[in-house]
Amino acid sequence: MKELKERIQRDAKVIGDTILKVDSFLNHQIDPQLMQKAAREFVQRFSDAPIDKILTIEASGIAVAILTGLELNKPVVFAKKAKPSTMPAGNYTARVKSFTKNTHHDVVISSEYIKQGDRVLIVDDFLAGGHAACGLIEMLEQAGAQLVGVAIVIEKGFQEGGALLRGRGIRVESLAIVDCLQGNTITFRE
Ligand code: 5GP
């Protein structure tokens, strides 16, 4: 997605050759117009696939996931990083490593909101090692739901997540794939 790549080139900060800081439009301040265009692009790329629900993980994927749900007129579910006391028993859970914080969370989805047979599109802001996506997929398997694919705003192609998911036969659509972060130079995959 050309506009997204231009925005990354203009506003992203490279931290230590592996992390892209995009707080000005995706991870802290959010540009709703750009996220709406990202959501429309997801919908167009998955237009051949019936989708019942959007699934993401808190917190940074929620904005673009909601806009995708709005475009599709479908509900959006986000996995929580801690189980609230108000959540009834009978949940799906997975242990997910946080790439940026180097911590682990036992993430949880209530079984009320993902049901057997639901056709689910996973949406997230970044794909790095694939930990978040694999955790979400594990919970969809617990539910007996059907994974339609994984829609990502920014994939870091030099990390293993994309190859891991595609190697499992999972359809991954990323709007920008960064192949290299070096110094302050950001190189995209064509
Ligand atoms: P993964 O689970 O694929 O290893 O990492 C994806 C998650 O880690 C995303 O949900 C995102 O929040 C965070 N993340 C991974 N790499 C980056 C990065 O370079 N920049 C930012 N801002 N977040 C990242």
Image (cartoon, rainbow, N blue to C red):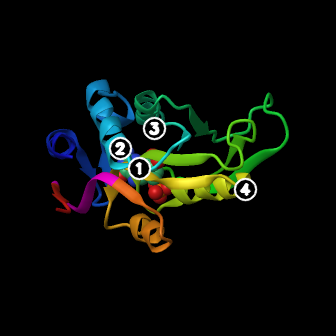
- Who's the residue at 32% across and 43% down the image? 44
Horizontal relation, residue 98 to residue 176: left or right: right
N-terminal label among 2 and 4: 2
Nearer the observer, 158 or 53: 53
x and y percent of residue 89 in the render? 85, 40
Determine the CA span between mark 4 and mark 1.
Answer: 21 Å
Horizontal relation, residue 28 to residue 9: left or right: right
Which dot, 4 or 3, sits closer to the camera?
Answer: 4
Residues tagged 3 and 1 counted as in contact (Cβ below 8 A) = no
Depicted 103 relative to depicted 75: above or below: below
**Circle 1 residue:** 151
**Circle 2 residue:** 42
Determine the CA span between mark 2 and mark 4.
Answer: 25 Å
Depicted 108 relative to depicted 131: above or below: above
Q: Main secondary structure of the magenta part?
A: strand
x and y percent of residue 6 in the render? 14, 43
Kind of residue at disc 4 = Gln
Residue 103 in sight here: no
